[in-house]
Image (cartoon, rainbow, N blue to C red):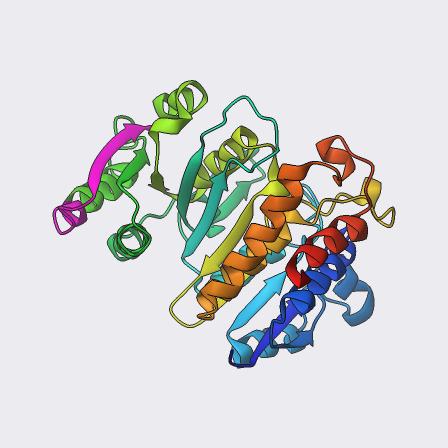
């Protein structure tokens, strides 16, 4: 195994707790990683006077890979989302969120295995907003480009081919948003012709949401624009037990940031009761990205064993184990 240097951002709230737990598991697994510790969000604001210090950005540019815990973002006021800023700064156009039913986790849907690909830099989240004080009118522009559409859709098809996935569903609202969603759909249909080995379909976003909660097992990969992807990724997480169980990755041509997709949960911060599964699975995605697929599989199998056994669970899964007790159980499986 090669030695890797990775930027580590523990984040806010429960972030430092789940980060410590994940590092414990990675160490037990024998991961050869030198961590470059950095701050972001509220923690960085207190120390550096900014939620996104230059030292953090320089670290990510240097290492090209980062693992990030949850970062707080004020609602309506305060500083701009750190997550959005990082994605745009490093052009991390592909947001990848696998939602898979985990063994031993009771849900309404026992056979969900969906990978969602969300365009990460355009759409309504491009941040093009204005407010007319005279009219008391707020506006936001959804910007969709052919280039942006092509690269996220092609990314989804390439991922599907490399990982043996069978089908891609493109989510859109081209019946109403004929120029923006229409362009995304047009590009999707064009690129799909280059991948005859992968089935392709498109669905209007509202119909897709209904289908997902009725028959989620019929979906494989979903690719869509920024806002729709943000909503769908949480919906898919709900199908398998919630955001505490779902990993995420933000990938560009030069940099990749792997993150827990849940919030910082300040109400339980410091109580050592948060579930570290989301960040741990994000770390396994990071390991695969670094070429350490076998190690990633070992960690995933150890996690599955602990969940399947059901003896040690965090409170969100109906147990009483602390964050670190859960991590120690996984680490013990790895060292047997």
The answer to if 218 sits in the magenta stretch is no
Residue at 55% x, 52% y is 300
The answer to if 203 sits in the magenta stretch is yes
Residue at 68% x, 42% y is 75
Q: Where does residue 145 sit, x and y in percent of width and height?
A: 29, 52
Left or right: 9 in relation to 130: right
Q: Where does residue 301 sit, x and y in percent of width and height?
A: 55, 51
| Residue furthest right in the image | 271
Left or right: 12 in relation to 112: right
Q: Where does residue 96 sit, x and y in percent of width and height?
A: 44, 51
Q: Is residue 10 visible?
A: no
Q: Quadrant of residue 79?
A: bottom right
Report the front residue among 49 and 167: 167
Q: Where does residue 336 sit, x and y in percent of width and height?
A: 67, 60
Residue at 30% x, 32% y is 177
Q: Quadrant of residue 317?
A: top right
| Residue furthest front in the image | 336
**Total marks placed:** 0
Question: Where 270 sits versus 26, above or below?
Answer: above
Left or right: 94 in relation to 105: left
Residue at 56% x, 81% y is 3
Left or right: 209 in relation to 136: left
Question: Where 100 sits versus 61, above or below?
Answer: above
First to last magenta residue range: 190-204
Q: Is residue 63 visible?
A: yes
Report the front residue among 41 and 23: 23
Question: Where 214 sits versus 137, above or below?
Answer: above
């Amino acid at each position: 195994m090669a030695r890797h240097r990775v930027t580590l951002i523990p984040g806010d709230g429960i972030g430092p707790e789940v980060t410590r737990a994940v590092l414990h598991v990675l160490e037990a697994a024998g991961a050869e990683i030198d961590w470059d510790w950095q701050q972001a969000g509220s923690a960085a604001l207190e120390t550096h006077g900014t939620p996104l210090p230059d030292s953090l950005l320089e670290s990510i540019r240097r290492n090209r890979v980062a693992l990030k815990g949850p970062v707080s973002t004020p609602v309506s006021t305060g500083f701009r989302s750190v997550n959005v800023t990082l994605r745009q700064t490093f052009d991390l156009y592909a947001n990848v969120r696998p939602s898979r039913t985990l063994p031993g986790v009771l849900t309404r849907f026992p056979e969900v295995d969906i990978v969602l690909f969300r365009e990460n830099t355009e759409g309504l989240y491009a941040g093009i907003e204005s407010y007319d004080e005279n009219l008391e009118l707020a506006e936001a522009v959804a910007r969709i480009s052919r280039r942006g559409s092509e690269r996220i859709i092609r990314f989804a098809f390439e991922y599907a081919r490399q990982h043996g996935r069978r089908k891609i569903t493109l989510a859109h609202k081209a019946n109403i948003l004929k120029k923006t969603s229409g362009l995304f759909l047009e590009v999707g249909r064009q690129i799909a012709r280059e991948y005859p080995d992968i089935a392709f379909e498109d669905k209007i976003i509202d119909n897709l949401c209904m289908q997902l909660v009725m028959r989620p097992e019929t979906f494989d990969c979903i690719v869509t624009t920024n806002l729709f992807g943000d909503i769908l990724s949480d919906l898919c997480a709900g199908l398998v037990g919630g955001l505490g169980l779902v990993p995420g990755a933000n990938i560009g041509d030069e940099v990749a940031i792997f993150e827990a997709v849940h919030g910082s949960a300040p109400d339980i911060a410091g109580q050592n009761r948060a579930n570290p599964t989301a960040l741990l699975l994000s770390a396994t995605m990071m390991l695969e990205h670094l070429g350490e697929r076998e190690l990633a599989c070992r960690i995933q199998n150890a996690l599955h064993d602990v969940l399947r056994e059901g003896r040690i669970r965090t409170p969100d899964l109906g147990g009483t184990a602390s964050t670190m007790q859960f991590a120690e159980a996984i680490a013990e499986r790895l060292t047997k």
